[in-house]
Image (spheres, rainbow, N blue to C red):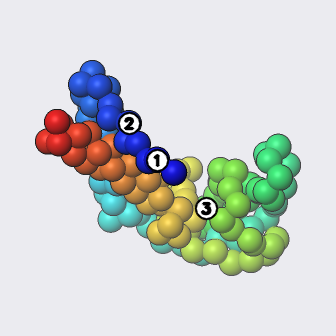
Amino acid sequence: MIYTTIIPTRKNRALFLFLGICLSFAGLFFFTQNAIFLSSAQNSIGAVIDIDNNCSNSTKPMSTYTIEFKDKDDILREFTTSCSSIYSYEIGDKIDVVYRENDPSFAKINVIYDIFMFSAVLLFVGIGLSLNALYFYIRN
């Protein structure tokens, strides 16, 4: 079998480099925003009060969870997670929650994977595209 390498054109290399740099900066931006959020966020214990299993048409089971928690002023708050398959909670399960002190309606489940995954994917894809484009620039 003959293996060939497709070398991107100069225009495509510039596009990949630009796209990679943009994705890297976007990932870094979201990463720092999440880090700032976590550094100033308040912690609370919440409970799952509702589960919606009909949030996706995919074959993979995906759910949204409605979580109720008390803020630092003992006011009962609730929020709904985005559609995801990474959680497997039941109604009544206790969960660590982080929320903005000045805006308790903005809350997230305190799971590092969930908080930083999007920014990490953007960052690593951007770095990969940039390194690939730089490799072909140097090679040719």
Of mark 1 and mark 3, the one earlier in the sequence is: 1
Looking at the rendered structure, the kind of residue marked 3 is: Ile
Disc 3 target residue: 75
Q: Would you say 121 lies left or right of 69 here?
A: left
Give the vertical position of 57 relative to 43 (above or below). Answer: above
Q: Which residue is drawn at 41% across and 42% down?
A: 4
Question: In what element is the residue under mark 1?
Answer: loop
Question: In what element is the residue under mark 3?
Answer: loop
Observer-nearest residue: 49 or 31? 31
**C-alpha distance separating marks 3 and 2:** 60 Å
**C-alpha distance separating marks 1 and 3:** 68 Å
Disc 2 target residue: 6
Mark closer to the observer (1, 3): 1
Q: Which mark is residue 2?
A: 1
Mark closer to the observer (3, 2): 2
Q: Which residue is drawn at 57% across and 65% down?
A: 109
